[in-house]
Structure formats: structure tokens, C-alpha cells
Image (tube, rainbow, N blue to C red):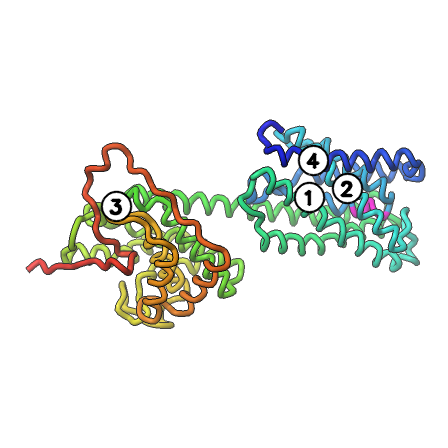
Amino acid sequence: MRGLPWYAKLYLTAVIAVAFGLLGHGLAVGRFERVDWSTLLVLALLFLVCESVPTLLNVKQAAISVSFSAALAAVVLVGPPGAALVGMTAVFSVRPGLALTKRLFNGAQFTICGYAAGEVFVRLGGVAGVPEIENFEELILPFAGAAAVYVPLNFALIAVMLSLAAQVDRVPVRGMVQLLASYLGYATFGLLIAGLWATVQSISAVLVLLPLFVARWAFGQYLAQQRSYDATIAALCQAVETKDYYTRGHCTRVSLASTMIAEEIGMGPERLRAIRYAGMLHDVGKLGVPTKVLQKEGPLTEEEYAAIQLHPMRGLEIVRGIDFLDEAFAGIMHHHERHDGTGYPMGLAGDEIPEFARIIAVADAFDSMTSDRSYRGARPVPVAIEELRKAAGTQFDPVMVAAFVKAVERDGWEAPRKVPVPPGEEAETVVIKDHDDPTTPIQVVSER
């Protein structure tokens, strides 16, 4: 608890106090006397095994497991106090490196969820105990009510703790809703365990949860693969940004802005991930452009400008062998095309330009205008928005501009902090043009 803010400590203490209060009340009024302890022991062991081998999430220090299926089965088989006690076994999870405070919080929130779900089950007409096969359909409504309480309550308790502990800047609502929906579907496994218990007893848990364990393992492998992809992309971005201190963070911000546009126009999860990668790598071709050209003061020669125009193609050459980029290739290759057909490298116009490229073009220009450069300060967001509107229909796709403006007006935009120039860099040549900024076009002079 030492590193937690005081309000997070207060919340943690309150959750733990409520959990132990519920267990103490159940013990005081004798509710544990009617519990089948042999069934409870099997379910507690199953719950503990599930909780000890969770799947890590992309949220910092957070994980999920299939233990809630065992907890919901406990709601049916051993009732509210038994389900609460099963949840408390999370304290004894064998996950390595799990701090005592996290163990206590996990056990407490599972206790609260189990007890609340159990009460709903009973109030809706459910009877705790091994169900009779001929009356199985009578369990469906009470169990549905219990699951509808257990899963959202579990998510809410965890989301509040993550937010208060500052482990996430904000709770990813869309991802949480998708995960919540999938868990409500998985809740039926708890009902299957309870139903099969009448015939094969404890073996029912193995029959039901073994395939689910395999599925969660596969999901964990998928997340590990995504993390390795992200690390690869980050390494390439870092290599690009070492060429110019003033563009540090540019790739990340373009990726964020591109994702905002993509979400606004309704792209699905797979394409959202691809546009995020495309935004991160849109300038990777700069690795193939001489640094003296990128940082040259004043107008460029025709040969130097040609080198600049080739950087999208260089980028495609660099990343062509990375299979998981998929549609991102088109965004990298064509993000400097213009809506009126006067862009590069191929002079595409209108809908000929790939959708990813039309998105990145808007995001790229906006971040360039709202970031500090060596030759000027960052422009205010409203000014940059107005410049995008002016260029809609000529340089930019009007649909993408409108989508980005709508997203910024709703969610806002955090302008990047001023980047300190390392000692000794102040005397370097000052760049007075930016090929990404529509308000400062590159000047080209003939070599003749």
C-alpha cells in the first residue's frame, strides 16, 4: 500500500472491510451451517487453480482468469455464503510476485461479488444445492440474474481500483465493454458445472473448464504476440526519431490521431490495430533519407527534394517483410498523396488514395502544426483545425478532416510538451521548412 494514493488506500480498506463484514455476518447468523463443505472445498480448489494461472492484459499489472465460472457454480451449489468463501480463496493465489494488498483486494472483491450474486440467485427463486435434473430449467432465470450482477460488479470494483491507483490514465471503456460481454457469455459455463454436478459431481468442473483453459491459454499467446509486435514497432519509431530531437513523439501522436479518425468512421478492431501501426511507421522511410537533407536550412535542390519524396517508398521497402502490418503498407506508401492529385509518390487523387493514407495525411499534418519545431513554436489546436478545414478537398479528404475535427471536439487533444534540446545541439543548423506542415511548403530551387 506504500505507493498508493490515500484515496486508493481508503477504497482498498473499504472493499476489504465490506468483504470480511459479509463473511462475519454469515458466520454470526449461522448461514455456514447449511453449506456442503465437501462441495465447497472442491469449488474453492478449482477457483484457486483458475485464479493462479490468469491471462495478463495490456493494462498495466492487470490480469483476467476463468475463475468466475467456478464462483458462479458455487452460487448455485453452495449458496451466497459459500460463494463468498470460495471467492476469498483468491488470497491464497500462488501467482508469483503478487503483493499482499493485491491478494487481499482480489479476495475481497470476489467475496463481495459472490455474496451479491448469491443473494440475487436466492431472491429470484433459486435454491442452493445440487440441482435436480428434471427441474434444471428452473435454475436458468435465477442464474442469469446472478451472472448479470457478478460480472459487472467484478469489473466495476476492479476498474475503480485501477483508476484510483493511477495504473491507467483512463479506463478503456470500449475494451472493457467488449470484455464484459464476452464474460457474460462465458458465465454459462458456471451453469453447466452446476447442472453436470448432479450426474458426475466434481468431474463436471474438469469437463467444462478444460476447453476453456485451452481457449484462455490461446488468448494469452495472442496477447504475447501483440506485445512483441508493439516492441518491434516502437524500436523502428525510435530509430526514426533519433534523426531529429524536435520530432520526438511524432510517430506516437500520429498513431493516436489516426486511431481517433478510424474510430470515428467506424473501423473494426483488426483495422484499428493496423492503422495504429501505420501511424507509428508512416515516416520510417526517413531512415533512407540523408540527415543533412532532412535538416537542411533553406530551399532544397531538385535532387534533395526527390530524396524527400522517395521516403514513403523507402518506408515500404523497410517494412515490406513484416507480415503482420497488412493494410498498414498502403498508409505508409501513400500518406503524402493529395486529394487533388498533386501529391507524391504516385500522384493519386480522391478515392484512388488508400483509406489508411487519407487518414494518416490528416493526422500527420495536424501533429506537425501543433508541435514545436526548431524554426517556430507549436500552433494552437484551433488554428491547426482551421488549417485542416482550409485544405479539405485539395490536400486532404474532407470526410477524414470532418471525422478528426469531431473526435477532437469530443475528446480533446493534448498538445506535446516542449522537447528540450540536448547540450551541444543548439548550434546545429536550424530547419526552416517541414514537409509535413501544410502551412510551410518546401521550397525547391533549380540546380541549373
Q: Which residue is mark 2?
A: 112
Q: CA distance from mark 2 to mark 3?
A: 56 Å
Cα–Cα span, label 4 and label 3: 49 Å
Tell which tag, 1 or 3, sits nearer the viewer: 3
Q: Are marks 2 and 4 in contact (CB under 8 Å)?
A: no
Q: Earlier in the sequence, mark 4 or mark 3?
A: 4
Give the amino acid type for the residue marked by disc 3 in the picture: Ser
Mark 1 residue type:
Leu
| Residues marked 1 and 2 touching at CB (< 8 Å) | yes
> Is the C-beta separation of discs 4 and 1 under 8 Å?
no
State which mark lies toward you, 2 or 3: 3
Task: Reply yes or no: does residue 73 show up in magenta.
Answer: yes
Q: Which mark is residue 374?
A: 3
Q: Identify the amino acid type marked 2.
A: Ile
Q: Which mark sits nearer the N-terminus, 1 or 2?
A: 2
Q: Is residue 264 above or below residue 191?
A: below
Q: Amino acid at mark 4?
A: Phe
For label 1, the residue is 157
Return the residue at label 4.
105
Secondary structure of the residue carrying tag 3 is: loop
Magenta segment, which residues?
A: 72-76
Q: Secondary structure under badge 1? A: helix
- CA distance for labels 1 and 3: 47 Å
Disc 2 to disc 4, C-alpha distance:
11 Å
The answer to if 374 sits in the magenta stretch is: no
Report the front residue among 422 and 292.
422
At 76% from the left edge and 51% from the top edge, which residue is drawn? 149
Q: Residue at left 18%, top 48%?
A: 296
Residue 266 appears at what percent x and percent y? 52, 65
Prevailing secondary structure class for the magenta stretch in the rendered image = helix
Residues packed near mark 3 inside 10 Å, few (<14), some (14 to 19) or many (20 plus): some
- How far apart, in angstroms, are the residues tagged by discs 1 and 2? 10 Å
